[in-house]
Image: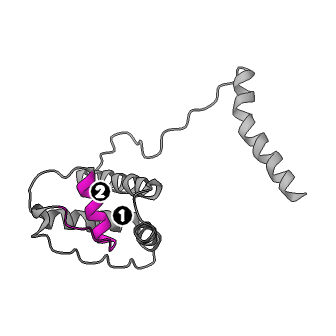
Amino acid sequence: MRKSHVLAALLAVSAAPAALAAQGAAVPAKPAAGARAGAKIDPKKAADVQRAAIILRAFNLAFESKTVTQPVKGALMLCLYNSKLSDISAATERALAASPGGQKPDATAIYRAAAGVCGVTFKKADGAAAGAKPLPPLKPSDGKR
């Protein structure tokens, strides 16, 4: 019985702005989260967030792929579960900075570096990867989220 009361309250709260708008009453607009006037985003923080989004998207594609084996999917899931995405992104940045090339990495390079940070190793496809050394494992976070 209690769940029906909660559901009714949620429906009433969600319908209130629409009911006010239908009556012609002005509904106050909420400012967007983090959209303060004059707020500037640190470029390093923006790059970390963008890299984290690429990593999460790439891992999601790996989870949905039929060509990725279950042990790899398990290692990626375990890494996401045990580590903060920001920690994975920062470790990926360090791994990409240590790799030779000097060019801006694409989504594939970011995925390979992030998977390497999570303990996934890849087979060498050609001689270009022959000099690549294995990446150090990601240090576990302190448990604060």
Which element type, helix, strand or loop, lies under badge 2? Answer: helix
Q: Which residues are magenta?
A: 108-125
Q: Amino acid at mark 1?
A: Ser
Compared with 44, 23 (above or below) is above
Q: Is residue 12 above or below residue 22?
A: below
- Badge 1 crowding class, 10 Å Cα cut-off, few under 14, some 14 to 19, many 20 or more, is some
Q: Position of residue 46 (x, y in %)?
A: 29, 51
- Under mark 2, the amino acid is Asp
Q: Position of residue 88 (x, y in %)?
A: 33, 66
Mark closest to the chain's N terminus, 1 or 2: 2
Residue annotated with mark 2 = 48
The alpha-carbon separation of the residues under discs 1 and 2 comes to: 7 Å
At a point 77% along the width and 42% down the height, the residue shown is 11
Circles 1 and 2: CB atoms closer than 8 Å = yes
Residue at the image position 71 percent from the left and 20 percent from the top: 24
Q: Is residue 66 above or below residue 98?
A: above
> In the image, what residue occupies the spot 60% across and 32% down?
28
- Taking depth in this image into account, of 42 and 73 the one nearest to the observer is 73
In the picture, measured across the screen, residue 129 lies left or right of residue 38, that is: left
- For residue 86, which numbered disc appears in the image? 1
Q: Which residue occupies the extreme right position in the image?
A: 1
